[in-house]
Image: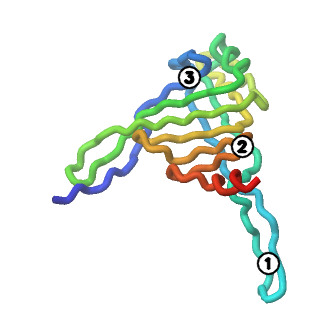
Amino acid sequence: MDNGYKIPTVLNNFNTYASGHKYVGVSSETTLPNFEYLTETFEGAGIAGEFEEAVEGCFASLESETSFQNIGKEYFLFLAQTGIVTYRGSMQVLNTANQTNDFQQVTVVTKGKVKSFELGVLKRGGKGEPKIVRELYYVKITIGGQEMIELDKFNMVWKINGVDRLQKVRSQI
């Protein structure tokens, strides 16, 4: 019997949490960080040119940007937030075997501090769309209970699909 595939189609909904506070209806969107490896140019005898070698587990600055509907008490609570911010969502997935929808939990845990913020605009009858940018030192993404990635810059942890790619490095230093 064909079990088909589960294709993630849309994030059905999500909530933002910080210091035990649930930001219902006020945070509207979050841009997750881009992971860019630090690299070193490598060249030498017997190599036709040069190439960039990624330094395993070492990344450039990581940022997340959280947008809000308008400025308000919730926005300023988030602005003062240091430490853990968690985004919990429900990803709608299409089961190709029976063409039905199912749902998988998506959790993104971040640690960091505010790097910049925009107060947005004041607009009659509209949203101000203020934003807060955080510098991240820790990111962990779990989908359907399975750990996908975890980066902890201060503890030299870099996991992909649950495999700690820096464990050997930590044991050698």
Quadrant where the image shows the N terminus = bottom left
Is 116 displayed left or right of 95 in the figure?
right
Q: Is residue 129 visible?
A: yes
Residue occupying the far top of the picture: 73
Secondary structure at numbered mark 1: strand
Residue 153's disc is: 2
Q: Position of residue 172 (x, y in %)?
A: 73, 56
- Residue drawn at the location 56% of the way across and 16% of the way down: 20
Q: Is residue 41 above or below residue 29?
A: below
Residue that label 1 marks: 50
Q: Earlier in the sequence, mark 3 or mark 2?
A: 3
- Residue drawn at the location 50% of the way across and 35% of the way down: 107
Q: Which amino acid does the dot numbered 2 rest on?
A: Lys
As measured in the structure, the alpha-carbon distance from the residue carrying label 3 to the one carrying label 1 is 45 Å
**Contact flag, marks 3 and 2 (Cβ < 8 Å):** no
Q: Residues within 10 Å of mark 1 (few under 14, many from 20)?
A: few
Q: Is residue 66 above or below residue 152?
A: above
Secondary structure at numbered mark 3: strand
- Residue drawn at the location 50% of the way across and 52% of the way down: 161
Residue that label 3 marks: 17
Relative depth, front residue between 71 and 41: 41
Give the foreground label among 2 and 1: 2
Is 116 displayed left or right of 68 in the figure?
right
Q: Position of residue 56 (x, y in %)?
A: 69, 58
Q: Which amino acid does the dot numbered 1 rest on?
A: Glu
Q: Residues within 10 Å of mark 3 (few under 14, many from 20)?
A: some
Q: Earlier in the sequence, mark 2 or mark 1?
A: 1
Q: Which amino acid does the dot numbered 3 rest on?
A: Tyr
- Residue drawn at the location 31% of the way across and 55% of the way down: 5
Q: Is residue 36 visible?
A: no
Relative depth, front residue between 149 and 80: 149
